[in-house]
Image (spheres, helix red, strand yellow):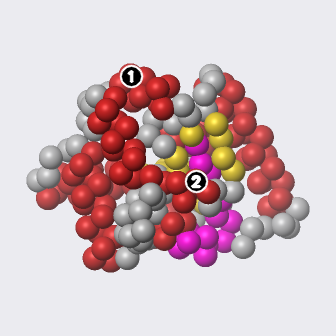
Amino acid sequence: MIIIGITGTLGAGKGTIVDYLVEEEDFDHYSVRGYLLEEMKRLGMPENRDSMTTLANRLRAAYGPSYITDQLYDQARDNMHDCVIESVRTPGEVSSLRRKQDFYLFAVNADPKTRFKRIKKRGSETDGITFNVFVANEQREMESEDPNKQNLLKCIEMADHTFINDGKVKELLEKVKKIMNRIKKEIADGKRKD
């Protein structure tokens, strides 16, 4: 079972990579965002980024920094099928997933203005924000000394493969395909990642 974690900045292309892995590589998809949205609905919380961040931080503080991705990993393990876990946001999540065999962390980034245009176009329930709010949200999630809070900068640094997505979707997917072919070859050659 190959496990790929996806980390990266807001609107950088995490979902595009996930779609490729699901549609072209037959991976199952497990989403931190989806998990949190379900919990927010169950708890009657407003569906916005602030609520999502608050809930995630609360769960990590109560149950450990890797709690959410551990829950998703447990679901994936029960299915024993290649999977992608989107969106890894704390070093504790990375460390926990690294203890699983054949785990790879992909990071994706792009220019902030490009990313803001993408999230406006995407228009999900948490994307109706101004550029200033977008920048403030991202800065809040980029670094933290608290292991239970988001630290995207550290997660990106911990990635096995980093993709810069300032170009066209096709260019990003070509890079992802090349890395996936390399990973599959390593595994086929018995150079499994531990």
Q: Quadrant of the N terminus?
A: bottom right
Residue reaching furthest to the left: 44
Q: Is residue 82 left or right of residue 12?
A: right
Residue name at image x 44 percent, y 52 percent: 142
Check disc 2 and report the residue beneath it. 156
Quarter of the image for residue 160 reads bottom right
Q: Does residue 168 appear in the picture of this structure?
A: yes
Label 1: how many Cα within 10 Å (few below 14, some 14–19, many 20+) = few
Which amino acid is tagged 2? Ile
Residue name at image x 23 percent, y 43 percent: 48
Residue name at image x 51 percent, y 36 percent: 12
Could you tell me residue 17's position as x and y percent?
58, 39
The local secondary structure at tag 1 comes to helix
Q: Nearer the viewer, residue 65 or 24?
A: 65
The local secondary structure at tag 2 comes to helix
Residue name at image x 26 percent, y 67 percent: 58
In this rendering, is residue 175 above or below 139? Answer: above
* C-alpha gap between disc 2 and disc 1: 24 Å
Check disc 1 and report the residue beneath it. 121
Which amino acid is tagged 1? Lys
Q: Quadrant of the C terminus?
A: bottom right
Q: Is residue 106 left or right of residue 120?
A: right
Could you tell me residue 136's position as x and y percent?
33, 42
In this rendering, is residue 168 above or below 172? Answer: above
Q: Which residues are magenta?
A: 95-108
Could you tell me residue 29's position as x and y percent?
49, 50
Residue reaching furthest to the right: 189
Magenta span contains residue 136: no
Between circles 2 and 1, the one closer to the viewer is 2
Magenta span contains residue 107: yes
Could you tell me residue 4's position as x and y percent?
60, 56
